[in-house]
Image (cartoon, rainbow, N blue to C red):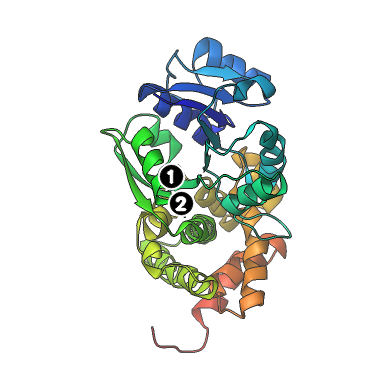
């Protein structure tokens, strides 16, 4: 049995805490939101996850400092724009023997660090010799994992023993975990697929059918692989669960915040209003400007990514952008 702390009680953090509790581990889940923590503690429900009853053995708390006592595993389920703050705050309690797991999909502003790189940077700043940083990513909607629907995910780390340890504590008959040492590739997949999900949702909002959505997912994978090649990732990662697997589910499902946000954009809603209606963090919106920085840094051809950026940040008409993409110069596949 492991003693686990999950930082963040959003839908994914809360569901992961619940999964680990049901796996027999001693789990504490922290969040700032007192109303949410009270609901989870007393009524065992999450306002964003209707129909899911949380195990009463979970310990939910707003007490950050005391939640770290005697923990073997720290799970970071924090939005990317707050990840550094919470990671930095946590470092006073971190030691070289703990496993540090990121569930967050995105990159940091300015540095363009992935979340595992933010953790590694904070470890270095605080002179902590810990090589047990792991990322969990794959086609796993919280709504389905919370209902014990069969799901698969990837445990990625430069340290294969750390990846295997995380595989062991998370895996059960409904939650299958694979290992991978290409942690950067897994995180690039996790971030970029959200942009393609936005694009797919935009097309749905415009009233188009399955043909063009399938094409955008396929060509989106090509864009994602271009980025991975430029950065030096393992190409096989992009054809696995963390890559094409996560892209399919995020770009087609109504459980996907990014797909739903894109649909609202396609219907003509401005990004600010769409985000307000979704009511949760949409990591694809946060990531689009960073993707453009990567495009420019490596001089990459990313037409779908560029089109989404124009719609979200320059208020371009979604139908006009779609027309521009469809009438680009002829190319071989």
Tell me how far mark 2 sits from mark 1, CA to CA: 7 Å
Give the position of the C terminus as an image quadrant: bottom left
Can you say whether 299 is above or below 61 in the image?
Answer: below
Q: Position of residue 47 (x, y in %)?
A: 55, 24
Can you say whether 321 is above or below 152 in the image?
Answer: below
Evaluate whether residue 221 shows in this view: yes
Can you say whether 266 is above or below 136 in the image?
Answer: below
Evaluate whether residue 206 shows in this view: no
Q: Position of residue 297 (x, y in %)?
A: 66, 75
Question: Which residue is most to the top?
Answer: 42
Q: Residues within 10 Å of mark 2 (few under 14, many from 20)?
A: many
At x 53% / y 59%, what residue is drawn?
202
Helix, strand or loop at label 1? It is helix
In front of the other: 10 or 19 = 19
Write down the quadrant of residue 222 in the picture: bottom left
At x 25% / y 33%, what residue is drawn?
173
Say if mark 2 contacts mark 1, CB within 8 Å: yes
Can you say whether 238 is above or below 172 in the image?
Answer: below
Q: Position of residue 236 (x, y in %)?
A: 36, 66
At x 50% / y 55%, what residue is drawn?
190
Residue 123 relative to residue 175: left or right: right
Helix, strand or loop at label 2? It is loop
Q: Residues within 10 Å of mark 1 (few under 14, many from 20)?
A: many
User: Residue 239, labelled with which disc?
Assistant: none
At x 49% / y 69%, what residue is drawn?
228
Q: Earlier in the sequence, mark 2 or mark 1?
A: 2
User: Residue 162, labelled with which disc?
Assistant: 1
Residue at mark 2: 157
Write down the quadrant of residue 209 in the picture: bottom left
Write down the quadrant of residue 251 in the picture: bottom left
Give the position of the N terminus as an image quadrant: top left
């Amino acid at each position: 049995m492991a003693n686990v702390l999950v930082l963040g009680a959003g839908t994914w953090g809360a569901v992961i805490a619940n999964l680990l509790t049901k796996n027999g581990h001693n789990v504490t889940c922290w969040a700032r939101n007192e109303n949410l923590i009270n609901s989870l503690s007393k009524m065992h429900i999450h306002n964003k996850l209707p129909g899911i009853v949380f195990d009463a053995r979970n310990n939910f708390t707003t007490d950050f400092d005391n939640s770290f006592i005697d923990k073997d595993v720290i799970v970071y389920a924090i939005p990317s724009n707050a990840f550094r703050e919470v990671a930095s705050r946590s470092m006073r309690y971190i030691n070289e023997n703990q496993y540090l797991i990121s569930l967050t999909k995105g990159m940091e502003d300015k540095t363009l660090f992935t979340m595992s790189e933010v953790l590694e940077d904070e470890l270095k700043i605080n002179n902590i010799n810990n090589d047990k940083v792991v990322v969990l990513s794959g086609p796993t909607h919280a709504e389905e994992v919370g209902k014990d629907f069969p799901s698969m995910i990837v445990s990625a780390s430069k340290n294969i023993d750390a990846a295997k340890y995380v595989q062991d504590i998370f895996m059960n008959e409904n939650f299958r975990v694979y290992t991978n040492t290409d942690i950067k590739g897994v995180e690039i997949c996790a971030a970029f697929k959200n942009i393609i999900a936005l694009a797919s949702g935009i097309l749905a909002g415009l009233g188009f059918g399955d043909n063009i959505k399938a094409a955008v997912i396929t060509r989106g994978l090509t864009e994602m692989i271009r980025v991975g090649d430029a950065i030096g990732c393992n190409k096989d990662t992009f054809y696995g669960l963390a890559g094409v697997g996560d892209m399919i589910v995020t770009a087609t499902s109504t459980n996907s915040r990014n797909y739903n946000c894109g649909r609202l954009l396609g219907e003509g809603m401005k990004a600010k209003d769409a985000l307000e209606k979704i009511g949760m963090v949409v990591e694809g919106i946060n990531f689009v400007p960073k993707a453009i920085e990567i495009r420019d840094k490596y001089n990459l051809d990313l037409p779908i990514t560029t089109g989404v950026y124009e719609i979200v940040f320059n208020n371009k008409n979604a139908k006009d952008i779609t027309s521009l993409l469809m009438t680009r110069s002829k190319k071989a596949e």
